[in-house]
Each structure stands twice: as structure tokens, then as C-alpha cells.
Image (spheres, rainbow, N blue to C red):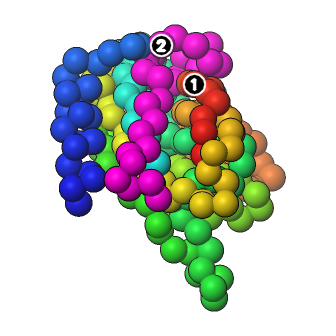
Amino acid sequence: MKRLLAPLVVLLIVAIGIQQVVASGSCTNCNWAPSSWTSVSVFIYPDSPDYAETQQSFVWSYEDLEAFLALDAYYQYEIRRDRDVWDYMTIGEWGDIIVVGSYWTTLPNPTDMWTEEADLGGDEEFELKVINSDELTPDTWYVVYVEFWRDPEDRGTAFTLWSESEYAGCVPWYLPTPPWCFDWCTMTEQIEGA
């Protein structure tokens, strides 16, 4: 709990005075995605080396949020890695999914259900969904903090980390009838040490 307290204080400070707003990644071309976002900050504390912590903030302008709400879809925030080096969820001995990380966010009523993080099929994606997108408000900085368990075998190696925005809705994507209403874009991409 002590590990969470310090980052939460930092998150509140960041949420009040957002620093280092970036405008890169493919989301700059998506009128439904957040309008501005920060880079992903990564923390690995010497006194708790088994965990890596990330935080990012983002905001929608009025126009971009209107475009998103017109899609009648849910919003999804992702932290994706190209290698299995950090885990939010993992597969247990009996095939059950075990949550080994944690998250905190100012997004309204998020859920981490249906996440691909458990590395089923090779995906390494932490996902938070806002099912009722009408609860999102323009000009509000949303903060997402995620704590990942670090795989001891991969520490000291490098991997690519992306933060992404995604939406899904309308006809479910797995049905053969369009429109599927599914798209994503990259907010940030960076190289990190495992």
C-alpha cells in the first residue's frame, strides 16, 4: 500500500498541472481519440524491484469527444508491450487467470474485464474499458496508473511499450455483418528496460 501512496500523490499533482504534453503517434490523425496526452512515465523503485509502474494522462477536446460519442462505442485505453516482460494478469497452474498487478484511474467506472493481458494468443495488452462513454467529459485530464509484475528472467532487457486508444461498439467485431465499429491508434511508443 505504501508503494501506491506515493504514485497516487504524484498522479494528483500531474492531474492538476499536466507536464510534457506530446502530440505524436497515429492518434493525432483520429478525431475520435483524445486530443492531447503525456508521455508514459515508467517507475521501477529499488525497494520494490518486482514491480514496474506506469502513468499517463490524456484529455479530449469538446470536438473530439463529440466525434467519439457519435460512434456509440465504448472507449478502451491500452498499454501494450512487444514482449512478455511485465504482467498485469497471468495464467495460473490450473489455467485460471490471476491478477498480479493493480491500477488506479480517474476514468469514470472503468473495467479491466475482457483484457488480452493474460497473454492468451501472444497478446501483451493491459486494457481498461469505459463501457458507458457518456460519462466522459471534455477538457478533463484523465490519469491512468498501472502496476505490472516484472518477470525476473527478463530484467535488464529492452522492449517496446505503446500506449493506445481504441473504441469498439455497434455490431460486435466477431459477427460477420458490418459495421463493426472498431479502431485503434497509438498515442506513444517508447523503448523501455524490463
Can I make out residue 15 in this image? yes
Measured as percent of width and height from the top left, residue 65 is found at 41, 23
| Residue 95 figure quarter | bottom right
Between discs 2 and 1, the one toward the N terminus: 2
Identify the residue at horizontal 56%, vertical 75% (top origin): 97
Q: Is residue 33 magenta?
A: yes
**Residue 188 circle label:** 1
| Position above or below: 44 against 67 | below
Residue 36 located left or right of residue 84: left
| Front-lying residue, 19 or 170 | 19
Separation of marks 2 and 1 at Cα, in angstroms: 8 Å
Q: Magenta stretch?
A: 22-51
Question: What is the three-letter code of the residue carrying label 1?
Answer: Thr
SS assignment for the magenta stretch, majority: loop
Q: Residue furthest front?
A: 46
Identify the residue at horizontal 43%, vertical 31% (top origin): 41
Q: Which residue corresponds to mark 2? A: 22
Measured as percent of width and height from the top left, residue 146 is found at 41, 48
